[in-house]
Image (tube, rainbow, N blue to C red):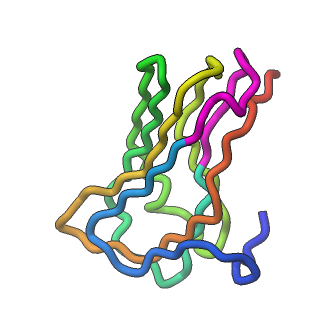
Amino acid sequence: MSQDYKDIEVPQMLEVCYLEIKGKFNMSQLTRNAKYEVVFVVMQPESRFGWEHPVTLSLDTPNDKSTSRKSGELKNMPADEWKELVVGSFTASGRGDVTFSMLGDDKTHWKKGLVVKYVVIRPVAYN
């Protein structure tokens, strides 16, 4: 993945003690019964700090299937390199909204330096 993000408009976190990134999309745009995954594509600049605590990645589907996991991947992430954080996977049912989030709710530690290039919903390749 390209390290250059200055040619596109991307959100960059400056300094926060509470991080919440949320999104949703309608499954009607997806192929029914196909398996998909939701992935955040992120980067941290050299000047980052405060990522000692994991973030929570969550995925909720209309059929009440939810997944949530703690990810410490941001703690040791190399600077200035795009990285994929897989939120989770699901099988498209054809109707309803899928919601996803990244939550850093350790309110006692300030964080700095997270660039979100995009979130992708892509088919899972079968091997």
The image position of residue 47, as x and y in percent, is: 48, 84
Out of 77 and 60, give the one closest to the viewer. 60
Is residue 96 shown left or right of residue 103? right
- Residues shaded magenta: 25-39
Q: Is residue 124 magenta?
A: no
Above or below, 69 against 61 in this view is below
Q: Is residue 33 magenta?
A: yes
For the N terminus, which image quadrant?
bottom right
In the rendered image of this protein, does residue 64 appear above or below residue 99? above
User: On the image, which quarter does residue 48 sit in?
Assistant: bottom left
The residue at the far right in this view is 127
Q: Is residue 65 left or right of residue 3?
A: left
Quarter holding residue 88: top right
Nearest the eye: 76 or 8: 8
- The answer to which quarter of the image holds residue 116 is bottom right
Q: Looking at the image, which is closer to me, 120 or 78? A: 120
Between 109 and 92, the residue placed more toward the observer is 92
